[in-house]
Amino acid sequence: MPRHILPNHTLIHGDVIESLSTYVPNGSMDLLFIDPPYNIGKRFGASPISRLPESDYLNWCYKWLALCLQKLKPNASLYLMASTQHMPYFDLFLRDKVHILSRIVWCYDSSGVQAKKRFGSLYEPILHCVCNPKQYTFNAQDILVEAKTGAKRKLIDYRKNPPQPYNSRKVPGNVWQFPRVRYKMPEYEKHPSQKPIALLERIIKASSKPEDMVLDPFAGTFTTAFVAQQLNRQSISIEKEAPYVEIGLKRLNQSPQK
């Protein structure tokens, strides 16, 4: 399995289970972001993970997920994305192994395929988990968003003494609205399931510190590594498909560190 070692960032071209077992030390990661193939028909190069029988798909997922958990530090955080169909299985698998802090909904303006005989899917679920609910990183001040009650409506909170305006900034709730990455957008890369920079920025800013190690076992277009580089974090990324590794090398080599 070839590795590409850049300053503070390692790109591994190989199978997720073999790569995790060989190259990622146990107890070494501060943040884990997982965006696996959803097994709902999208093709990722030559990967067979597109329409496996559900039991085969879940057994495969449980293997790499158990390995991923071994790589985390005692105070690490984990974000896991999955299809709406399969997220309940991941939720049940994880709930006695880590502490689930939030069940997040990432929603967007339109579905990939316009449904005609059912309600189209306009969201993807994300689990936010921590290894230790009493000690974990959450940088609230780095991810504040506008609080419309205070910023727009200028309401006064009379429960306080003396009364004062509501805050104009707040920590985001668990419904996140970011546009999907579309063709001809500046960040677009040729991939069937690219995640937006803004989504990863919120996750990495919230749940890691500068110089922390971030692991992405299904790198895809390497948005996690790209954002980690921009935010002065370190990263290890694993990707099985060679064309996507080339995308990752391009993105990390062309992005100046801040």
Image (tube, rainbow, N blue to C red):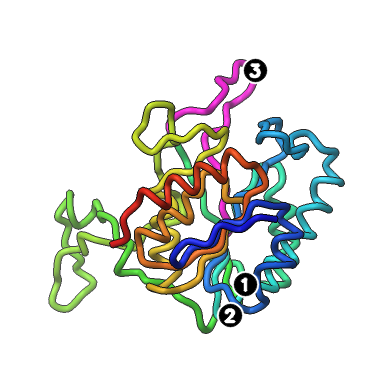
Q: Is residue 237 left or right of residue 43?
A: left
Q: In this picture, is 95 found above or below 33?
A: below
Q: Nearer the viewer, residue 177 or 168?
A: 177
Q: In this picture, is 162 found above or below 127?
A: below
**From which residue to which does the magenta span run?**
109-127
Q: Amino acid at mark 2?
A: Asn
Q: Answer whether residue 202 is magenta in the image.
A: no
Q: Is residue 169 visible?
A: yes
Q: Label for residue 99?
A: 1
Q: Is residue 96 left or right of residue 100?
A: right
Q: Answer whether residue 121 is magenta in the image.
A: yes
Quadrant of residue 229 within the rendered picture: bottom left
Q: Nearer the viewer, residue 77 or 228?
A: 228
Marks 2 and 1 close (CB-CB < 8 Å): yes
Q: Amino acid at mark 3?
A: Lys
Q: Which residue is mark 2?
A: 132
Q: Residues within 10 Å of mark 1 (few under 14, many from 20)?
A: some
Marks 3 and 1 close (CB-CB < 8 Å): no
Instruction: Identify the residue at horizontal 73%, vertical 71% (top origin).
Output: 96
Q: Which residue is mark 3?
A: 117
Label 2 vs label 1: CA separation?
7 Å
Q: In this picture, is 144 found above or below 41?
A: below
Instruction: Identify the residue at horizontal 75%, vertical 59% (top origin).
Output: 17
Task: From the image, give the main secondary structure of the stretch colored magenta.
Answer: loop
Q: Amino acid at mark 1?
A: His
Instruction: Identify the residue at horizontal 66%, vertical 35% (top origin).
Output: 44
Please state the horizontal and vertical placement of residue 169, each as a whole percent of the image: 24, 61
